[in-house]
Amino acid sequence: MKKIFILVLFFVFTNKISAITINAELFEYDEEKVEAAFADLDELENLLETNPEWTIADVAFRLPQYNYMLENVNPAPLGFTNISAPGNIPSFWWAFSFSIVGSYFIYSAVAGPIAVTIVYFNTDKDKAETKKAIYGCLTGTVLGLGIRYLVSNL
Amino acid sequence: MNRKYYFVLFALVILLLQKYSVEAQDFYRFKADYTIKLSNKGNKPVMKKGTVFYDKNVKKIVIKNGFPLKENIIHSDTSIYFIRVGRVINRTTNFLPVEFSVFHLALNGNLANYGLDKAGYILNDVSRDKGLVIASWLPENNFKENLGKIIIATKGKELYSIVYLNKKEEIISKHIFHKYMYDKGFSFPTEIVRIYYVDQEELYELTTYRNIKINETGNNEYYNYRIPE
């Protein structure tokens, strides 16, 4: 019985010690494994070396294989926040609203381009947001003119 | 007359030496371009790039991120602010005081023990192995319920690695500090590898710093960043 007790004590004790051995090996790691984990980023890194001002929006057209970063890298825990036109209105709909009304009442046709300009400065000259605003402006103008044509000819 | 001349000259030299030595030790601002690569569990790796600013008197880590998104991330004492085009889009609680960031510790010359002596840890044991000085730190009684042991390795007075253990003495993460830069008595690791052990899998984080500037006089708008209302 005494022997069993000593054996149990031995196992408990050795188990506690062997949980971790404190020596230089504890700080070793596989450098090649770390490098391999990031090998897929090499092409992106090279591209950004020559174009340090680019964002994922610029990269998306050249290297679409990295578009997944738009979803994965999101430091804002509440989800991707699309900061755009004043009042947090998405750029597309901001320009669309102004241009559809503006083109219907021909005299205020400049409203669309003005809305795009506002987005351009409000987003700190963000190319992607400005592009969305331009698409919104074009769509709104076509629709506004179409509605005007239909109303005046019916 | 000659004696008086030599005395004045000697006093001037002493004053200049004193001024230089004070200036050499007073590091208060840090700026660097960073690249962070993160491996994701079951997903493709991601990357962030930008510039970090830190003034130890202001105590705000200002991250001017450029990729994948342009935004400023400000770590203050209690909160982390996410700012895009001049507006706060999110605010979260900061659980890691800026005083325990690598920037603050390096500017104060406390990186070697990672500021653990001021973070509720007690030095438990010190040993040597293969050129490393290995120190084991235990949490103070008040924190023993939640925190595990931390083991720090230093190489030639510089922080080499940190291993975090849980209460069961299992490794939960390992940080390795590489490729130190030196500038007028200031040193900083330009490569930090962080390995996290999650569900028997290793996740990696590789941070590299370039173009490090100390005590920069420009860019005050970043060092003293004002959080928009």
Image: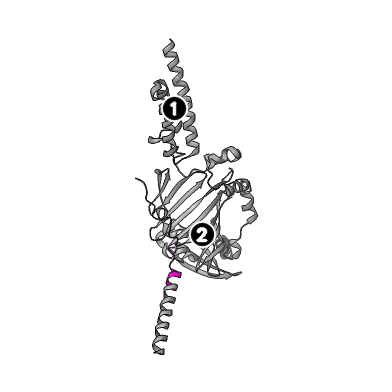
**Vertical relation: A37 (above or below) B147:** above
Asked whether A21 or B91 is in front, the reply is B91
* Residue for point 61% across, 58% down: A29
The residues tagged by marks 2 and 1 sit, at their Cα atoms, a distance apart of 45 Å
Q: From where the camera sits, is residue B171 visible?
A: no
Q: Is residue B70 magenta?
A: no
Q: Which residue is mark 1?
A: A96
Q: Are marks 2 and 1 on the same chain?
A: no
Tag 1 secondary structure:
helix
Q: Position of residue A138 (x, y in %)?
A: 48, 26
Residue extent of the magenta highlight:
B21-28
Q: Position of residue A59 (x, y in %)?
A: 57, 41
* Image disc number at residue A123: none
Q: Is residue B23 magenta?
A: yes
Q: Which residue is mark 2?
A: B212
- Going by the numbered disc 2, the residue's amino acid type is Ile
Q: Position of residue A100 (x, y in %)?
A: 42, 23
